[in-house]
Amino acid sequence: MKFCEKCGTYMQETKDGFVCRKCGNLVQASTANGTIATKKERPPAIYIVDSLEDESMTVSQVCPECGNGEASRWVSSVSGEHAGIRRERTIEHFRCTRCSHSWSKPS
Ligand SMILES: [Zn+2]
Ligand SMILES: [Zn+2]
């Protein structure tokens, strides 16, 4: 139950917060009940350390999508954990110069 600060009319609760039907005053739900939901999320086990897409170059690689023989190639290193052992590996990325289909394979 909440009343409008401006005109004293009973405010209706919506998903956005409390709305005054008389003057249109809106009080956001987060400020209305004083709590902001904070959810702590676990970082993913695998994340890309750096992607060197700027240094991509064109190589002869057959696109599995359209059969084109040229693709731009770049390498990124990926850090991941497997069974508690931390390891880094590099992945080769390719993007077809004709259809822009991209794929990758561990190098
Ligand atoms: Zn009002
Ligand atoms: Zn292609």
Image (spheres, rainbow, N blue to C red):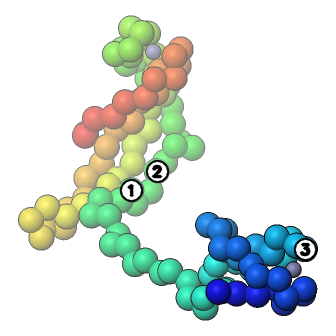
Question: Residue at 32% across / 64% down in the picture?
Answer: 44
* Label 3 CB-ligand 1 distance < 8 A: yes
**Residue 14 location (% of width, % of height):** 65, 68
Mark sitting on residue 48: 1
Instruction: Work out whether residue 100 can be spotted.
Output: yes
Percent across and percent down for residue 37 are 50, 80
Question: Residue 51 bears which disc, if any?
Answer: 2
The residue lying at 27 percent from left, 64 percent from top is 45
- Lower sequence index among marks 3 and 2: 3
Query: How far apart are labels 3 and 1 at the CA level?
Result: 50 Å
**Residue in view at x 62 percent, y 81 percent:** 30
- The reply to whether residue 79 is in sight is no
Amino acid type, callout 3: Cys
Q: Secondary structure at mark 2?
A: strand
Residue at position x 70%, y 74% in the image = 12
Q: Tell me the kind of residue under disc 1.
A: Ile
- Pick the residue in front: 95 or 57: 95
Per the image, the residue denoted by label 3 is 23
Question: Which image quarter: residue 60?
Answer: top left
